[in-house]
């Protein structure tokens, strides 16, 4: 799942969308094995190392990095974009670290983008796990924490996650988490040198029944 280039969602007919600035400090989530924290410029070296270790997988499932894209400066710029997105209420990024290796390498990342309030109250979800940590359940553990934050703290109603056909690992992960396939988008993203179809899935918040509160601007 690619974090930085997910297209915006079309506004449902008659719906009003609102961007709402985040309040409070950036969140930090903890699970039994992991810590998920929003990146600061101190995380740029860890992010660069993660991108270099996983460059083949990132290219296979995401857009090609621009010239100079694997550099400290590019990671600092990415962090600054994420911080601006958090401030204006459109983006939340998490870097994933092992709790027992607080200063150890970054093992994954999760991104919430295109965050919309109003009567839609939705976001897109993207994620990557370090290839050395695949098959350990770390991404499932991370996403359960993020989903809880989205529904319980951000009070959103809908999370959308899309993947390339043939990405069976993401398909199984999202199915285990309760995401439902809603369709297939043709030529959805330009990935690895061509426009690629994507499978569209979503997860909705079963507790979001107060429609009057949901449809308010905040």
Image (cartoon, grey):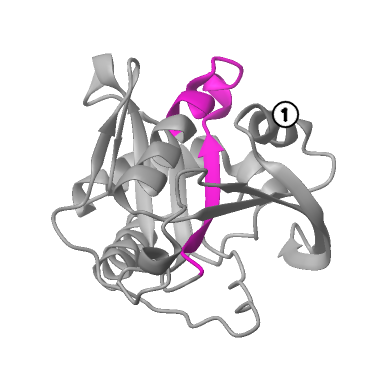
Q: Quadrant of residue 24?
A: bottom left
Circle 1: element type: helix
Residue at left 64%, top 60%?
A: 64
The image position of residue 156, as x and y in percent, is 42, 56
Q: Quadrant of the C terminus?
A: bottom left
| Highlighted magenta segment, given as a residue range | 120-142
Q: Nearer the viewer, residue 77 or 120?
A: 120
Is 189 situated above or below 164? Answer: below
Residue at left 77%, top 38%?
A: 167
Mark 1 neighbour density, 10 Å: few (under 14) some (14–19) many (20 or more): few
Q: Nearer the viewer, residue 22 or 45?
A: 22
Mark 1 — residue? 172
Residue at left 54%, top 40%?
A: 128
Residue at left 45%, top 63%?
A: 211
Q: How many marks?
A: 1
Q: Nearer the viewer, residue 209 or 65?
A: 209
Is 135 situated above or below 122? Answer: above
Is 211 situated above or below 136? Answer: below
Give left or right: position of 105 versus 168: left
The image position of residue 41, as x and y in percent, is 22, 53
The image position of residue 163, as x and y in percent, is 72, 48
Q: Quadrant of residue 101?
A: top left
């Amino acid at each position: 799942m690619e974090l930085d280039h997910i297209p915006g969602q079309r506004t449902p007919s008659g719906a009003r969308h609102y961007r709402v600035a985040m309040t409070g400090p950036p969140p930090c989530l903890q699970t039994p094995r992991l810590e998920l924290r929003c990146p600061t410029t101190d995380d740029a070296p860890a992010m660069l190392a993660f991108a270099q270790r996983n460059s083949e997988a990132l290219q296979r499932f995401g857009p090609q990095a621009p010239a100079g894209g694997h550099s400290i400066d590019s990671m600092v710029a990415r962090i600054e974009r994420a911080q601006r997105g958090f401030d204006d209420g459109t983006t939340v990024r998490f870097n994933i670290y092992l709790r027992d290796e607080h200063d150890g390498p970054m093992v994954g990342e999760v991104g919430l983008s295109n965050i919309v309030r109003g009567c839609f109250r939705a976001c897109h979800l993207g994620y990557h796990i370090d290839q050395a940590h695949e098959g350990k359940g770390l991404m499932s553990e991370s996403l359960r924490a993020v989903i809880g934050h989205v529904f319980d703290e951000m009070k959103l109603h809908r999370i959308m996650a899309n993947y390339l056909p043939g990405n069976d690992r993401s398909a199984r992960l999202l199915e285990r988490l309760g995401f439902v396939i809603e369709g297939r988008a043709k030529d959805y993203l330009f990935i690895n040198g061509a426009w690629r179809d994507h499978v569209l899935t979503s997860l909705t918040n079963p507790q979001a029944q107060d429609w009057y509160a949901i449809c308010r601007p905040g």
